[in-house]
Amino acid sequence: MTVTGVGQYLRDAGKISKFGRGKSGAKMTTTDAATLLIGVNASELAKDAVQTVETYASLPLSDAPHPYDLNDNMGGGEALKQVLHNPANAVECIAGLVRLCIPDRRESPVLFLLNNDIEVVFHRPTPRIDVSVFQKSPSRDRAFIGALIFSSANHVAAGDRRVEIKISTATLRAVGSLLVT
């Protein structure tokens, strides 16, 4: 399975932007990037990416408490709070995180300025996405700040095999840097 293969299935299904080719081609949006991240990380096979994205995008935000205690003086804490405050769905949440990672004119992504690590974990075969924030410390330890969990009790997986794919702030920053025009 390749990113290109997943992208082609998603593009053909209208899940990500599709206009022209090359320099006249569509510019990828943060929503496109979030959709592709879900397709690549939550699908077992490229041909399953469309159904996987539809399933994961429809996961409701869990009722579990998700407190975030971000310091507004950390250079972007308020922006991160806005992304994490009751997103409509997982795609919106991940798109918001990617948007925060697009370098600004000073070439400094907002999340880079924060003293936090972000982790997004894709679970399968039972669909679930966890978005967690950790505060870094000088000792390289991390303190858990909070999490959003997108899951549904309606999905039942057969067997006991569990797969977790984790992406971090580094991946979000790499994707964000690709979206700079």
Image: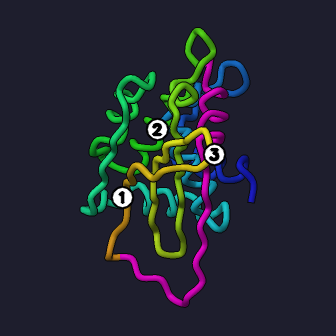
Q: Which amino acid does the dot numbered 1 rest on?
A: Ser
Within 10 Å of disc 2 (Cα), the crowding (few <14, some 14-19, many 20+) is: many
**What is the CA distance from the residue labelled 2 to the residue labelled 3?**
28 Å
Q: Secondary structure at mark 3?
A: loop
Disc sitting over residue 58 in the figure: 1
Which one is in front, 33 or 107?
107
- 71 left or right of 164 in image: left
Residue placed under numbered mark 2 in the picture: 95
Earlier residue among tags 2 and 3: 2
User: What's the image's color scheme?
Assistant: rainbow
Residue 20 seen in the figure: no
| Among the 4 quarters of the image, the one containing residue 163 | bottom right
Q: Residue furthest top?
A: 105
Query: In the structure shown, which secondary structural element does the residue marked by tag 1 occupy?
Result: loop
* Numbered label attached to residue 113: none
Which residue is rendered at x = 40% and y = 50% of the image?
A: 90
Which-is-in-front pick, marks 2 and 3?
A: 3
Q: Quadrant of residue 17?
A: top right
| Residue stretch in magenta | 155-180
User: Do the residues bearing badges 2 and 1 touch, measured as CB atoms within 8 Å?
Assistant: no
> In the image, which is nearer the foreground, mark 2 or mark 1?
2
Residues under numbered marks 1 and 3 in contact, where contact means CB atoms less than 8 Å apart: no
Quick one: label 1 or label 3, which is nearer the N terminus? 1
Residue at the extreme front of the image, as rendered: 139
Q: Eyeballing the image, is 28 above or below 132? A: above
Task: Please tell me which of labels 2 and 1 falls first in the chain.
Answer: 1
Residue 53 located left or right of residue 150: right
The picture quadrant where one finds residue 176 is top right
How far across and down, in percent of the image, does residue 6 sit?
66, 53
